[in-house]
Image (cartoon, rainbow, N blue to C red):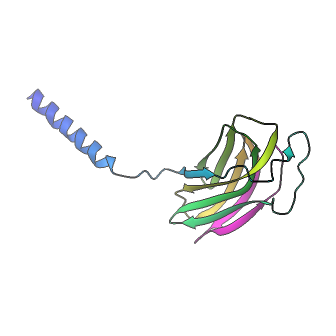
Amino acid sequence: MKTILKIFLLSGLIGVLAMSCGKKSNSFDLTNFSHSGCKTGTEAYSINNQAQESQGDTETMEIKSENGFWSVKHINAMFNCSPNKLTADAAINGFTIDINENEEGHGANCLCLYDLSYKIGPIAHGKYTVILNKMGAEYFRFNIDYTTSVDTTIFIKKTIL
């Protein structure tokens, strides 16, 4: 009798696990991260000198909603000229979204501009505060009212970290 009960319980557990294998997670995440290489002509930003803004160097975040996810393009994000790796992750807490962009390793004594892109979500409709963090520190903060859709460009004040 005990053997039959064990087999029955084990079969039930296997069935539950098998049914959950094909389901997608609804947890918030940052996916599809990619970035350009160091943009031509931007290597001149020396870490020891103050960066000079020139036309075409405007830092922006383009955000578009797609089926409950936001497609984000961070244009002209400034990082080391030769990082080992650029990374990004995100988290949500209520109506606050934290986006963390980082570089691993500092291979050169200069900075240059990169274009980063990624998707974050799923995101429910609401009014959000988005906090962009770079290298563990708050870099820029803005609000987005996501009532039906988002298709906006945020202009970011240039800051040298």
In the rendered image, residue 152 lying in the magenta stretch gets the answer: yes
> x, y (%) of residue 84?
67, 37
Q: Identify the magenta region.
A: 140-161
Q: Residue at x 74, y 53 (%)?
A: 39
Q: Position of residue 82 (x, y in %)?
A: 73, 40
Instruction: Tell me the quadrant of the picture where the N terminus can be found.
Output: top left
Q: Residue at x 16, y 31 (%)?
A: 6
Camera-side residue of 134 and 107: 107
Residue drawn at x 75%, y 45% as measured from the top left: 79
Q: Quadrant of residue 95?
A: bottom right
The image shows residue 55 at horizontal and vertical percentages of 85, 63
The residue that appears at 57% across and 55% down in the rendered structure is 120
The residue positioned farthest toward the front in the image shown = 40
Asked whether 119 or 103 is in front, the reply is: 103
Placement of 111 over or under 55, stated as above or below:
above
Q: Residue reaching furthest bottom?
A: 148
Quarter residue 7 falls in: top left
Quarter where residue 69 is shown: bottom right
Total number of numbered discs in the rendering: 0
The quadrant the C terminus occupies is top right
In the foreground, 8 or 56: 56
**Residue at the left extreme?**
1
Whether residue 59 is situated above or below residue 44 in the rendered picture = below
Q: Verify whether residue 153 appears in magenta.
A: yes
In terms of depth relative to the viewer, which is nearer, 64 or 111?
Answer: 111
Q: In this rendering, is residue 40 above or below 147? A: above
User: Residue 21 placed where, x, y %?
Assistant: 32, 46
